[in-house]
Every structure is written in C-alpha cells, then in structure tokens.
C-alpha cells in the first residue's frame, strides 16, 4: 500500500470540491491509494497546487508542485501486481519482488570459470581444471643391479620424447594412479616401488614384488588421492632391488587426474 496525501502549505483551510476533502492548515490529509482517479479529476486541487497552496505527498515523500501535477496527470495507481518466476529444472536466478523492484540473484564465477557480460549477452567460459586436468607419464627402465644398495630415479617420457618429471598443476586434490610391469630372471631378487611427490612418499610403505618362479612377469596397480601444490610438482618413482637377482625390466605408467 502506498499512502497518498494532500499537504496544505498555507495557514488556511483548503477545500477540494470534487472530492469534498477539507485539508486543515499546515496539515496533510491522507486518502486511500485507490482514490487516485478521483484526485486526478479534481481540477480544484490542481489549481491549489499551481497557486502554491498544496502539494502531493506520496509514500511519505513530499513532491514538488511540478511533480505533483505530473503525478496527477499520470496513470499511476501504485505497484503493479506482476512478478517473475523461474522455469525449467535448473537453478533459478529470480529471488523476489520488493515493491516495484524485481530482484535477481547475482552470478559469480566459480573455480576455473569466468563470466563476461555485454549489452545483450552473458558468457560463461571454463578456464581449465576439473577432470580435464590430467597428466600421463610413462617410462621403460632397465635395472641391472646386483646389490640392495643400488637405487634408480628415472625421468618420465611421453610420446617417445624425454620430458621433465615436473608437472604444473592448479593445485588441490588429485587421483594418483601408478601401474607397473616388471620381469625377473630369477627368484632371488625383489623390485621395490616407491612413488614420491615433491620428495614425499605417496604411500605409507614401499611396494615389493618377489617372483615365485624364474622368468616371471609381475603387474601391479596402486592408487591414492593426493594433494598437489599450485604450480610445479616433482613426480618421482624410486626403484630399488633389495635382493641379489639381476636384469629386471621395469615399465611404469603414472596418471594424475584432478578430482
């Protein structure tokens, strides 16, 4: 409800003859909002306004004489009864109606997303991350060590070209998956597998494979959710032999995927 009133600017009584309103000196006489059309037809009220004797008070705001005349000649009866709604099954952007104002929720760019706006369009763009951030690292390495003290650190290769074992990530949680194959020529040795990220062990203990018979092929797969720092992260696979066997061929494949 918007209150509409007639304010008397003089020390005399004012009379609006069309509506038979009497406005006391220096007082405001309030009428119902639905009596707007009666006021709009009251020429005597317009004459009082033009003479500087009265003005309109709308919703607690005193209008000027010029604004009062415009108000009485404009087809305004208060707030419209319309509203807005959200359709479809997605997340709606309409929040509520406050008076004559339709209020909508703001759009905020989340992680790995940008929002740009023009006069007619709003565009959402993904900037990377999520499941699309994935690293594939692989290497075939020959370990020919006869003692338990020999340790190999190898550089990953991808697509047949040697690359650094440093991956640049946006940071956060990732799945670290390591699969490997080793071939032993005897039963007297064990291949020890210990993956590391930034010189920190990925798993709580090393993984060891010891063949049951000669010329045996092992396949292993281990995975764990890890945290990578934003920026460069060094990925290493520590390989060692804690037995006396020789000539094991080791192939490792690492996949790191954003959670």
Image (cartoon, rainbow, N blue to C red):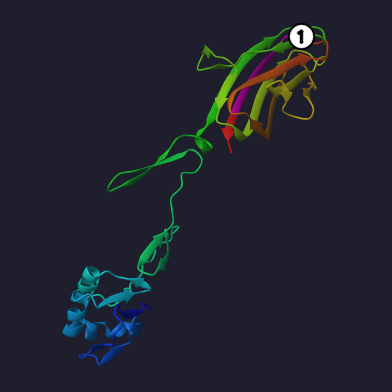
Q: Look at 17% across and 80% down and name the residue there.
A: 47
Task: Please state, as top left, top right, bottom left or bottom right, where the N terminus lies in the image.
Answer: bottom left
- Number of marks drawn: 1
Residue 191 seen by the camera: yes
- Start and end of the magenta stretch? 246-255
Count neighbours of disc 1 (C-alpha within 10 A) and say few if under 14, some if 14 to 19, many if 20 or more: some
Residue furthest front as drawn: 11
- Between residue 12 and residue 251, name the one nearer to us: 12
Q: Where is residue 104 in the image (x, y as percent from the top left)?
A: 41, 59
Among the 4 quarters of the image, the one containing residue 226: top right
Q: Name the residue under label 1.
A: 246
Task: Please state, as top left, top right, bottom left or bottom right, where the C terminus lies in the image.
Answer: top right
Q: Position of residue 169 (x, y in %)?
A: 56, 28
Residue 215 seen by the camera: no
Q: Main secondary structure of the magenta part?
A: strand
206 with respect to 123 (left or right): right
Among the 4 quarters of the image, the one containing residue 244: top right
Q: Look at 20% across and 73% down and name the residue there.
A: 69
- Between residue 77 and residue 199, name the one nearer to us: 77
Q: Where is residue 112 in the image (x, y as percent from the top left)?
A: 48, 38
């Amino acid at each position: 409800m918007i209150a509409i009133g007639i304010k008397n600017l003089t020390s005399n009584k004012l009379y609006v003859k069309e509506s038979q309103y009497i406005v006391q000196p220096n007082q405001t006489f309030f009428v119902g909002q639905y009596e707007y059309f009666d006021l709009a037809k009251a020429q005597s009220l317009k004459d009082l306004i033009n003479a500087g004797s009265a003005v309109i008070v709308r919703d607690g705001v005193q209008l000027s004489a010029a604004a009062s005349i415009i108000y009485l000649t404009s087809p305004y009866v208060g707030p419209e009864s319309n509203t807005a709604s959200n359709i479809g099954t997605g997340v709606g952007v309409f929040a509520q109606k406050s008076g004559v104002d339709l209020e909508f929720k703001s759009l905020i760019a989340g992680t790995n997303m940008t929002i740009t706006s023009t006069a007619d369009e709003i565009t959402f763009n993904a900037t990377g991350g999520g499941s699309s951030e994935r690293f594939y690292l692989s290497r075939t390495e020959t370990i020919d060590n006869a003692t338990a003290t020999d340790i190999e650190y190898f550089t990953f290769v991808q697509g047949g070209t040697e690359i650094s074992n440093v991956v640049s990530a946006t940071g956060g949680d990732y799945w670290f998956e390591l699969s490997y194959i080793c071939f032993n020529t005897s039963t007297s040795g064990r291949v020890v597998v210990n993956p590391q990220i930034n010189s920190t062990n990925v798993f709580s203990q090393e993984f060891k494979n010891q063949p049951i018979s000669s010329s045996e092929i092992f396949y292993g797969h281990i995975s764990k959710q890890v945290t990578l720092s934003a920026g460069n992260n060094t990925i290493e696979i520590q390989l060692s032999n804690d037995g006396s066997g020789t000539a094991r061929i080791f192939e490792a494949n690492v996949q790191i995927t954003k959670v």
